[in-house]
Amino acid sequence: MERVIYLDNAATTPVDPAVFEEMKPFFTERFANPMTYMHSSAGDVAHTAVEEARVRVASLIGSKPEQVVFTGGGTESDNWVLKGAVEKASRERLHKPGHLVTAEFEHHAILHSALALQRQGYEVTFVKVGRSGIVDPDDVRRAMRPTTLLVSIMHANNEIGTIQPIADIARVAHENGALMHTDAVQTTAHIPVDVNALGVDFLSLSGHKFNGPKGVGILFVRDHAALYPFIDGGGQEWGLRGSTHNVPGIVGLGKAAQLGKERLPGELERLTTLRTMLYDKLSARIDRIFLNGDMKQRVPQNLNIRIEGIDNEPLLLAMNEAGIIAAGGSACNAEETLASHVLTSIGCDLKEAKSSIRLSFGYVTTEKDIDYAADVIPNLVKFLRSMA
Ligand code: PLP
């Protein structure tokens, strides 16, 4: 197979071989249902594995194990907290639909959940985000109302990687009597994520963004009483999330969390160095190149650049031909021909948004990959500009 330089780790990452090894027996030999542990030793093996994974994830985010509720991934966690927490607080505190504050550049798991709530009569404020790609806590403060029940602001944006002042925003939410949620899908295992330092009531994370399997994540729930179940069913996850546990997935998520915690300090430094190296080289070799979003308040694995006079579609196709996989925006919206809603929300016009690409790095990224990308991309840009 030809060499592929995978620079789309914000979309997903490969399962680490050590994660895969731990998962394997739970498909075949250790397949029992963990809920049968009371009367079955086979069930006990599966149950113990689920609980060990819970401890590992809790250790990654600084929570208690019982505050970690396994879900089917980031999208489910985001849907659940918006719908489950807002509905419950509305019914119990206001006796009518309440108000939610979020931001214009959130992932569609949040934006579309917020729109679904709006259709049901709840009120939503979408806070604006400036060119830096960072939400101003004062804008959140101005959006608060006596009926505000939840504030949901992502920890880092999935397209431009900018890190948000979550602890400050959580303070604003709490001062105004609202709960605080953050979507930490792009930050967990990449920068320190501690639910107590962040001061959040809820936090979403997803296994496949840090070398775990797809289709499994968690919602950190500080107080189980703060939300209704999203999936009604059996008594799994304290009756908060019915459905037989995805044991191999949960075991894989636990192992990825353990590895992520061990590797975090080294990877934070290594990826920051690689990212800076690539940006410096591209800036030196391509004129009229700009960074989207703040460089300092940014996760180490993200570089989002705008190259004037270039359409991102032919550039990405040409890069793909040359063996470099990158993205124009979020993988979930890759079929949209429209420009990224994140870039337009931070003030880019359509042309600017369509001339932007996201390069995202991960555990598998090497210096050789970066050198190759830094050599190839400027030549492709030169060629495409000459054709324009
Ligand atoms: N939130 C953010 C910020 C994301 O980047 C993603 C994935 O792209 C999700 C939520 C959805 O997570 P999942 O793919 O696990 O449903």
Image (spheres, rainbow, N blue to C red):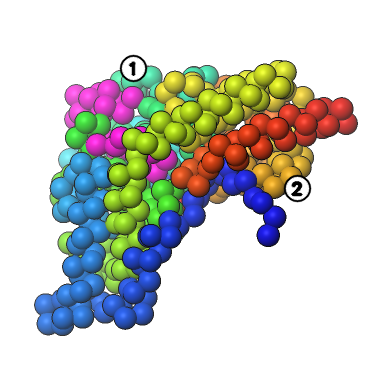
- List x then y, in percent, for residue 19: 38, 60
Nearest the eye: 329 or 21: 21
- Nearer-N-terminus badge (1/2): 1
- List x then y, in percent, for residue 121: 37, 43
Nearest the eye: 135 or 379: 379
SS under mark 1:
helix
Is residue 39 visible in the rendered structure shown here?
A: yes
Q: Is residue 274 above or below residue 75?
A: above
Nearest the eye: 33 or 150: 33
Determine the residue positioned at 25% across, 31% down.
Answer: 198
Determine the residue positioned at 74% across, 45% down.
Answer: 322
Quadrant containing the N terminus in the rendered view: bottom right
Q: Amino acid at mark 2?
A: Glu
Name the residue furthest right: 387
Magenta span includes 154? no
Nearest the eye: 383 or 86: 383
Count of numbered labels shown in the rendering: 2
Q: Which mark is residue 138?
A: 1
Residue linked to disc 2 = 321
Quadrant containing the C terminus in the rendered view: top right
Ligand 1 closer than 8 Å to label 2 CB: no
Determine the residue positioned at 40% across, 55% down.
Answer: 212
State the extent of the magenta-drawn residues as a range. 165-194
Left or right, residue 70 beside residue 35? right
SS under mark 2:
helix
Q: Is residue 356 above or below residue 363?
A: above
Left or right, residue 120 beside residue 146? right
- List x then y, in percent, for residue 230: 30, 57
Q: Residues within 10 Å of mark 1 (few under 14, many from 20)?
A: few
Determine the residue positioned at 31% across, 68% down.
Answer: 247
1 or 2: mark nearer the eye = 2
